[in-house]
Amino acid sequence: MPEIKFKKSADFALTVGYVPAEGGLPDLLGYTPTAYLEDGAGVSHALTCVMAEDGMSIELTATSQQTDEWRCGSASVDVRLTNGTSVLTDTLVFPIVKNITPLAAS
């Protein structure tokens, strides 16, 4: 798995891929994804979730204005998939680091 670092106050986008297990579902079509990120202070933030048309991945996003509220430190994110019942993905843990140079010119 690649190492991920995220810089606070930037747009956030993460694609979560689905790899079918042997004998498992061929895709995630029909499931509703919901995801939250827990920031370095333990505060939960809702992420926007968009399922790919083929049901093989989910794009998780947040705007720079939203991520400006995230606290630096160790972040955790997972996805709940609901279709009558709910299941959770594995949890991804990565650091949120402080941006030094402002994104907007002053």
Image (spheres, rainbow, N blue to C red):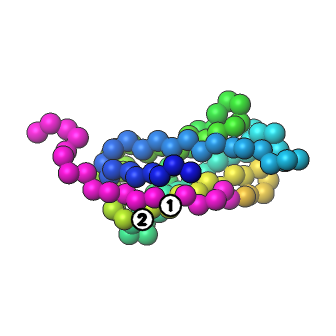
Give the residue furthest to the right.
23
Instruction: Please tell me which of labels 2 and 1 falls first in the chain.
Output: 2
Alpha-carbon span between mark 2 and mark 1? 7 Å
Residue 16's image quarter? top right
Residue for point 69% across, 52% down: 81
Q: Seen from this angle, which residue lies furthest top?
A: 53
Callout 2: few (<14), some (14-19), or many (20+) C-alpha neighbours within 10 Å? some
Q: Please tell me which residue is depicted at 45% across the width and 58% down the height of the picture.
A: 94
* Above-or-below relation of 73 to 1: below
**Amino acid type at mark 1:** Val
Q: Position of residue 98 (x, y in %)?
A: 27, 56
Magenta segment boundaries in residue numbering? 88-106
From the top left corner, tell me how far across and down residue 5 is, in percent. Answer: 40, 52
Q: Element type at marker 1?
A: strand
Residue occupied by mark 2 = 74
Asked which secondary structure carries label 2, the reply is strand
Q: Is residue 77 magenta?
A: no
Mark 1, residue position: 93
Q: Position of residue 51 (x, y in %)?
A: 64, 38
Q: Is residue 62 left or right of residue 59?
A: left
- Quick check: can you spot residue 76? yes
Left or right: residue 33 compared with residue 63: right
Q: Is residue 10 above or below residue 96?
A: above
> Residue extending furthest bottom?
42
Q: Position of residue 24 (x, y in %)?
A: 84, 47
Residue found at the far left of this picture: 106
The answer to the question of whether label 2 and label 1 lie on touching residues, with beta carbons closer than 8 A, is yes
